[in-house]
Image (cartoon, rainbow, N blue to C red):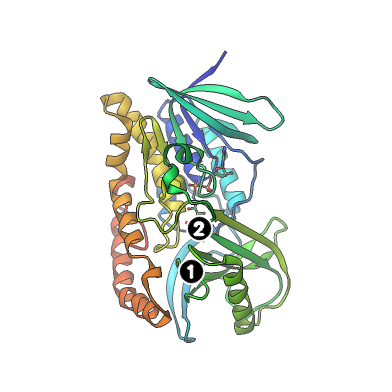
Amino acid sequence: MMKDYDVFIAGGGIGGSVAAKFAARGGLKTLFVEKQKTPRGKPCSGIQFRYFEKILGEKIPRERLCRHQISRIETHFHDGTSFRAPFPMFNYMRKTFDHWLNQVAREAGAEFRDECEFRDFAVDGEEVIVTVKPRGGEPEKIRARYALDATGLTAMPMRRALRPQDFGTAASGGGINYYIDGPARLDPKTVYQFWDLRFSDAMFAWIYTKTLDDGRDYWVVGTACTSGDIRERQKLFYDYVREKFGIQGRIVEKEELLTGMDMKSRDRVWLGQGRILMVGDAAGLLDGVRGVGQDAAAISGRLAAQAILRSRETGAPVLEEYARLTRPIVTQTRANQEREIDQCRNNEDLKRYIKRNMYKTVVKMMVQMFLNYFRPVEKLRLLPP
Ligand SMILES: Cc1cc2nc3c(=O)[nH]c(=O)nc-3n(C[C@H](O)[C@H](O)[C@H](O)COP(=O)(O)OP(=O)(O)OC[C@H]3O[C@@H](n4cnc5c(N)ncnc54)[C@H](O)[C@@H]3O)c2cc1C
């Protein structure tokens, strides 16, 4: 007999786990599945603002964080100039962090299966019939009233089925990180950003420190882009910072994420169709201008659960509720996607663009950080504003 749930969620990352936690806490029978064996690694810098705890509705345990937390940001330009500012942020490994978040959702009452891949779905009136495939097992059909696609930037199987026009044939962007052992003239409490179109046409390239499973700290050197050869950009950047900061040691690990979604499209945000909701990166909420996506993934997961609960209460279509609740973050993300940095023709333009916005951004950031303290989650202003 087919198993029956109120909510089915594909993806055990941040968006999926947060949606599962709040759906289960609201009394909904919830299943979330993760195709990888957990704890699983995920290409990500794992840096987030302090308001992240408010979105999660949890205090992040100290042992889930890296040894060094971020307290400063240092911004570098192509001509060698730079400036520093205080910048308190969380710093964690996604492997450790997401594993904890999976547990949080389970403790709230959600059922979790790892090594279980979402494969397919069909809408049947007021139900969604999904097919999952446990590793080594037979495909299984599950009935749910609502289905969420929280599978991140590479997979998005529900979005691919419903919006094939959003995908190109080749990868159109992604991110890459190298983990390096050995000393360097760098401060482990600082996150370094490099605004230089040779290294990144999407945002900035970066360096910071991370604690790996062996308990040791490593420098992470990485970049993201929406066009060109990311490995070439990364090589250029790595050679540049090795010399600039005397980075010694070997690359002990590389991680890479490439997406097939058209990252140049001005229409990346899409919330779903009928009873199928998109969450996090799958909804197109990754924001290159802000340089982060975990906060938007967590908020959208939480609001997707809230939308389902409200829809059951009011009888309004769930997508209408979801669109209403997510309007502030969707508006902000769309506005940022309109003014992406790849519109700068050269590095001089880029430096002017960053400097022009910098002072305004710092002031807005302080004001919005303060206001966020009092705002409900659905009214939070994503940072940097
Ligand atoms: C190199 C890099 C650095 C980044 N640095 C930062 C940063 O410092 N701060 C920040 O806020 N954001 C950062 N981001 C963005 C951030 O990683 C994403 O915005 C965030 O992870 C999105 O969360 P999500 O839950 O939508 O998807 P994900 O975290 O990608 O989770 C999706 C999950 O779904 C699973 N999955 C996929 N397909 C299936 C399937 N068919 N069935 C079941 N499960 C499936 C995947 O295995 C994965 O676990 C970075 C991204 C990259 C690439």
Query: Where's the N terminus, which quadrant?
Result: top right
Front-most of 43 and 72? 43
Front-most of 196 and 167? 167
Rendered view: 29 above or below 324: above
- Alpha carbons under labels 1 and 2: distance apart: 33 Å
Q: Which residue was labeled with disc 1?
A: 71
Front-most of 130 and 50? 130
The image quarter containing residue 183 is bottom right
The image quarter containing residue 163 is top left
Q: Residue at x 52, y 36 (%)?
A: 10
Label 1 secondary element? strand
Q: Which residue was labeled with disc 2?
A: 172
Residue 166 in view, yes or no: yes
Label 2 secondary element? loop
Considering every residue shown, the one lying at the far top of the view is: 1
| Residue 116 x/y as whole percent | 62, 33
